[in-house]
Image (tube, grey):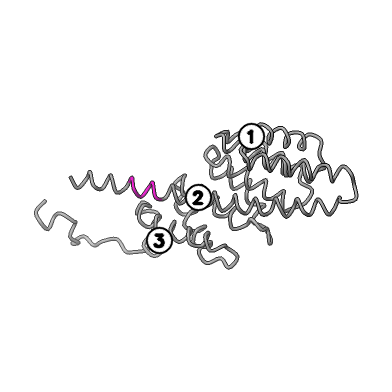
Amino acid sequence: MVDVFDEVEEELRKERYQALLREWGPWVGGAAAAIVISVAGYQFWEWRSGASASAASDQYMDAAAALEEGDLQRAESGFAALAESGPRGYAALALLRQGEIALQQGEADEAGRLFELAAERAPEPTTRQLAQYKAALARYDSLSYDDLTIRLTPLTEGEAPFGPLARELMAAAALRDERWDEARRAYDLLAIALNAPPGVSRRAAEALVFIRQNAPASAQDAGPQAEEPAPSDDAVIPGEENGQ
């Protein structure tokens, strides 16, 4: 019976951690929405004197309203038209929204493709980095830790706004792939990073607890334990003291 309870507890730990990995989804969505709104406003003021910019703004807002109302067909049509022929800023925003629709429909690969197109079209760094991050997040389940590291490392350089989230996603991939040392080092840094949002720091601390509970002994606290002297010849082997 003890083994059964251990297996159940292990499954519960896995489920809790999987929920932890997915928890940032709504937060990222909220951040993305705020950036989309701010960039849309920027593009509107940037191009306020042009008729095409004004038309693109109206078209984007109409498609966004349709999406909010649940009219996916009208929303998709409006975003697709903007992505095809709208000014670069609005085209990138439209591709981002198309990617979000694809994610809602369970089409992760298509969402990743659309986010990558948005990154190519984006005229300024914030939207481009957001699109790159969302592309990696959409394809998280199909990309290895090494692949994600190649994609996300540029987002961690300098004062990139998505640096902490990019590091967290790489750490999660290391943990998923049971690369315990990389995961622990990444989460150690995130837990104390001054520029990490509170949610990222909290999740890093929880992930470190998970690592301590689940990492194999060989991956636990590398260094001091690895340097402990080997037991002497007369050391008692567990089980022998009872004649086992």
Res 213 quadrant in image: bottom left
Q: What residue type is labelled 1?
A: Leu
The residue at the point 90 percent across, 47 percent down is 50
Residue in the foreground of this view, choosing between 4 and 188: 4
Q: Counting other residues with Cα less than 10 Å from the Cα at mark 1, is it few (<14), some (14-19), or many (20 or more)?
A: some
Residue 14 painted magenta: yes
Q: What stretch is highlighted in magenta?
A: 11-16
The percent position of residue 192, horizontal first and vertical second, equals 52, 67
From where the camera sits, is residue 140 visible? yes
Circle number at residue 109? none
| Disc 1 + disc 3, Cβ < 8 Å | no
Q: Say if 123 sits above or below 110 in the image.
A: below
Looking at the image, which residue is at 39% across and 59% down?
A: 209
Verify CB contact (< 8 Å) between mark 2 and mark 1.
no
Location of residue 112 by image quarter: top right
The residue under label 1 is: 72
The mark that comes first in sequence, 2 or 1, is 1
